[in-house]
Amino acid sequence: MTLVRNLRQRLNGNNQWLLLVLILGTLSSCDAFRKAQTDDYGSDEKTEAPEVLDDIQGDQVFNPRTGQYEYSTDVTEALDTVKWSVQLPENNPPIGSEATELAGGTDVTPPLGSDPNYPDDGKSEKLNRYNVAFLLPFYSHRFGDGTELPRSSGPALQFYGGAKMALDELAAEDLNLNVTVHDTKGSRETVRNLMGTRELQEAHMVVGPFIKDNIKIAAEAAKVNRTPIISPISPSSNVTNNNSYFVQVSPYLQTHCEAITQHVRARHRPEQIVLVVRNKEAEISRLRYFQAENARLNGSEDGPRLKEFIVTDQTSDFSEMDISSYILEGDTTVFVVPSWSNESFIYSLMRNLQVAKQKNHVIVYGMPQWMKYQRISYDYFEQLHLHVSSSFYTDMDNSDVTDFKQKYFDRYGIVPGNEAYIGYDVMLYFGRMMSKHGTRFQDRLDAEAARYLHTQFSFVREVPLSAALEEDFSKTNLIQNKYVNILKFEDYYFQLAE
């Protein structure tokens, strides 16, 4: 059942109406895509408005509570989580999210006689047809009689536009799918009600929702229903536990920090690296991610630690910040800066580094939000050899990317946004995994990495700490994509780093 109304195109030149009609206009109340009938982001730094940027992104998404586009939030690891590759817990446990739990505790009541923590037999079934349900925030109740499409609908429309193109390709590959599309309206109550419907209970895969609170509800219900659920946009942590059915596509903050550390350490000695944060609890707490990964790369906690520079300057322009003593004379110094909520701080840091480095070689590693900054000169990015981590990157010289961009424009009349690429990649990858491995395709995700248009899918199982200590890897907290793109700013644009 789709909860999205079919609207006529408005003749006002707004191409997003064309996208809406082409994407949604072909949907009946319970639509199926099939072959022809041959057999189809919560931080204490939010007080710094308007410079606030939330935690690691899936790119910007609409926040119905604020009425603004914001970066996806809540990217810290669960307190009792370790990775497959970790044999023992780290001395410094990961930082927990400070986001509050939903009022009222568990939102989904298991049916009588069921136990979501009791594992099933683990057997995957190959079917002639699979049921796929999308839970996306179209906000159809906001359309009204206006002449402009609400901005809040854009991300979901873009995502599903890309997914529809992937569905066509999957049909051509002989994958038969029954697809239902549901409007969550950004509402917890709507998601809770939808997860209790027959369509969702009988789904073999659920894609969505976008918002953390709604992901929590859907993930717990999917665990009860034993349905794989794909969280495609928000890198939300602490939404579910002991849930082998929950798949997180966008990497968490800790994963970004680990990826940066690995990239830097592969090219530089520990003594060349300086971690820089402001004297803010949220920023200081991120340092342990880098130090823990550095220790792992050293093979010992006794190896050289990375230097830390905690900026205590409280002036509005950070004019008293002195970074010069950290620059190595006649050597390369790498400054890693896991800070993003105050653009003025980053601007002052870059300016000071440019002046202080003189003839010495300086490299800066920043965070994905830096790519959205408006006030910092690209000359600083270029001259300080800026690198950033990102869950999203499309190479516009790649023929597959340009082909998708053209086909999307030809079909919908608008240029694809980030969500369109993500929707296409997510549906194509997971559809192919389902076709190949059946109903428990999620059990094979960590064995089959694949590069798609906007990123690489390289999934890792995360197991509860107690199970890891007992070397019991049959239990899974969740499955997360661990691949992070490292981009460098060179020739005045961001491109993949070597």
Image (cartoon, grey):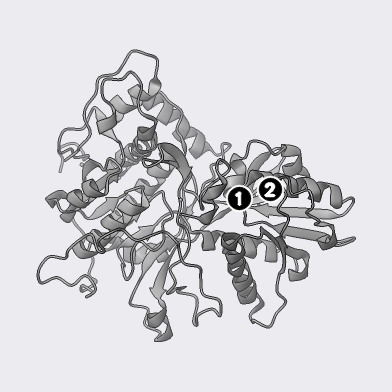
Mark 2 residue crowding within 10 angstroms, few (<14) / some (14–19) / many (20+) = many
Q: Quadrant of the C terminus?
A: bottom right
Residue drawn at point x = 22 percent, y = 27 percent: 6
Residue at the front extreme?
315
Indicate whether 357 appears above or below 9.
below
Depth check: give the residue in front, 371 or 54. 54
Give amino acid for label 1.
Answer: Trp
Residue pointed to by mark 2 = 346
Residue 498 visible? The answer is no
| Residue 297 position in % (x across, y down) | 63, 74
Residue at the bottom extreme?
470
For label 2, the SS is: helix
Which comes sooner in the sequence, label 2 or label 1? 1
Q: Quadrant of the N terminus?
A: top left
- How much space separates mark 2 and mark 1, taking CA atoms? 7 Å
Q: Are marks 2 and 1 in contact (CB under 8 Å)?
A: yes
Residue 187 visible? The answer is yes
| Residue 356 position in % (x across, y down) | 85, 51
Residue drawn at point x = 12 percent, y = 65 percent: 111
| Residue 53 position in % (x across, y down) | 54, 46
Query: Total number of numbered labels?
Result: 2
Drawn side of residue 363 relative to residue 56, left or right: right
Depth check: give the residue in front, 312 or 457. 312
Mark 1 residue crowding within 10 angstroms, few (<14) / some (14–19) / many (20+) = many
Depth check: give the residue in front, 260 or 205. 260
Residue drawn at point x = 33 percent, y = 53 percent: 213
| Residue 23 position in % (x across, y down) | 30, 31
Residue pointed to by mark 1 = 340
For label 1, the SS is: loop
Give amino acid for label 2.
Answer: Ile
- Within the image, what quadrant is residue 108 found in? bottom left
- Within the image, what quadrant is residue 168 found in? top left
